[in-house]
Image (tube, rainbow, N blue to C red):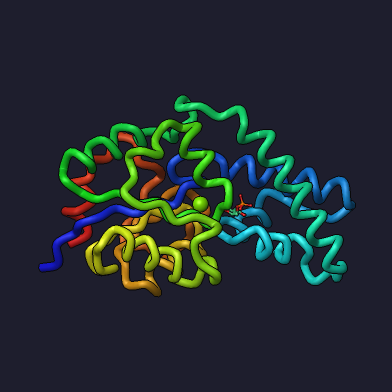
Amino acid sequence: MVEIKAFIFDLDGVLTDTAEYHYQAWQRLADAEGIPFSREENDAMRGLARRDSLNVLLKGREIDEATAQAWMVRKNDYYVALLSKISPDDLLPGVGDFLAAAKADGLKLGVGSASKNARPALEKLNILSLFDAVGDGYSVVHGKPSPDLFVWVAGRLGINPAQGVVFEDAAAGIQAAKRGGFYTVGLGDAVGEGATIRLPNLGGMRPREILARLV
Ligand code: G6P
Ligand code: MG
């Protein structure tokens, strides 16, 4: 039997509800530019890098490169303003206890987030020091649904993908993890089918229950 040695967490929508702030920031940009956009469409952006998210927003509209860059800067400025207000109170239900229990059980902990704002977010949540490896929007070239980011984190943790469990709220993230050969836990309503285990959130969940259900 394979021994699970590490848990790797997506950030936005898994550890904290910054997925909502990414949505609000894109919505503000879309409204200002007269582009129809909705919360449902935003679910298709979950887990995608900033540039890939812009392409989803544009829905085939063509803009020049300078405009694309300027729009991404504006979206990020809106997002960073929202992010500046988060604190340890903004961890999603059960996350603090779950991370502490996983560490106590001897598991290595990693983060695999597409976001270039992942490190400041983890600092604001006061959980950065819990993680043995943090992969973010600067770590790899090909973002989710490519497996590269999670494989990069696994390498930093010194595990094989088959020894790791990825926690994700995004369909693109589950796809990435499965392509990399990881076990998967899908969280929330937007994650779709495909994860080995699906849960509403980590509230009341113990790492050992996850392990018992996976292997
Ligand atoms: C996360 C979020 C996405 C976001 C991406 C890039 O994966 O789920 O919604 O677009 O990170 O974030 P960034 O902060 O670099 O724009
Ligand atoms: Mg996410």
Q: Quadrant of the N terminus?
A: bottom left
Residue at (25, 62) in percent of width and height: 158
In the picture, residue 52 is in which quadrant?
bottom right
**Location of residue 127 in the rendering, given as x and y in whole percent from the top left corner:** 39, 35
Can I make out residue 198 in this image?
no
Relative image position of residue 24 (x, y in whole percent): 70, 42
- Does residue 199 sit above or below 80 in this rendering? below
Residue 185, how many percent across, how many down? 35, 56
Q: Is residue 4 left or right of residue 34?
A: left
For the point 68% across and 41% down, the residue is 79
- Please count the marks in the image: 0
- At a point 37% along the width and 60% down the height, the residue shown is 153
Q: Confirm whether residue 173 shows in the render.
A: yes
Position of 74 with respect to 32 (left or right) is left
Q: What quarter of the picture does the C terminus occupy?
A: bottom left
Tell which of 156 and 182 is nearer to you: 156
Q: Quadrant of residue 61?
A: bottom right
Task: Measuring from the top left, give residue 120's x and y in whole percent.
Answer: 53, 39
